[in-house]
Amino acid sequence: MVPAAPTPEPQIVREALAALDGHGRRVPHHDRIAVVDFSVPSAQPRMKVIDIASGKAKDFLVAHGSGSDPGHTGYLHKFSNVPDSNASSQGAFVTADYYVGKHGRSQRLLGLDPTNNNALERAIVVHGAWYANADMIPAHGKLGRSQGCFAVGETELAALFEHLGPGRMIYSAKA
């Protein structure tokens, strides 16, 4: 069983909404956004897909990059936009096309900020992964780590894609 998700700090939601407004037409759909609060440990849901009109949210567990947590503590310690850093990046991303790769169905991301504008080159994507499944938490106390991608549990990927879809923003930061 996954512990209840903390509500994202209003500040991080305000930052995400400001980024959505600031990026305007670069983000085609403004009805839903995903907010990833990397100040929350990986053992708790820290990605929320928020319906802007209703305020309702769907929570997801999400892994961070190994380069962001070299000691594998379960907490993100640093962001990076550097190729081959295996770190998570901060800022606003727009979801792009789906494809099938080594992790199955995945979704490309375009970084919209100087802190993540290498996302496409770095192949930072949304994908499902065994190491992001909820059963990792009772066994290890945390999720495994990605190479900087937003990796969610394999059984949760379809629900995430259904709630988020292409042309919407993912905003990642630490509150």
Image (spheres, grey):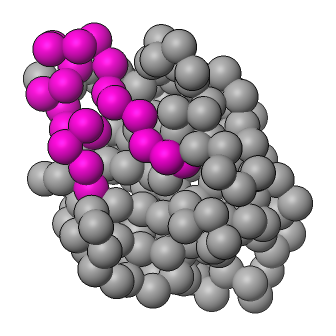
User: Which residue sits furthest front?
Assistant: 84
Looking at the image, which residue is at 76% across and 51% down? 82
**Nearer to us in this view, 61 or 17:** 61
**Nearer to us in this view, 168 or 53:** 168
Q: How many marks?
A: 0
Decide: is 110 above or below 133. Answer: below
Looking at the image, which residue is at 62% across and 41% down? 87
Looking at the image, which residue is at 23% across and 13% down? 140
**Residue 144 appears in view:** yes
Left or right, 7 with reference to 117: left
Q: In the image, residue 113 lies at what x, y percent? A: 82, 63
For residue 70, which quarter of the picture?
top right
Magenta stretch containing residue 114, yes or no? no
**Residue 48 appears in view:** no
For residue 27, which quarter of the picture?
bottom right
Decide: is 130 above or below 169. Answer: above
Looking at the image, which residue is at 28% across and 39% down? 132
Q: In the image, residue 64 lies at what x, y percent? A: 49, 37
Decide: is 113 above or below 150. Answer: below
Quadrant occupied by the C terminus: top right
Left or right, 116 with reference to 151: right
Q: Which residues are magenta?
A: 128-148
Quadrant occupied by the N terminus: top left
Q: In the image, residue 43 lies at what x, y percent? A: 34, 21
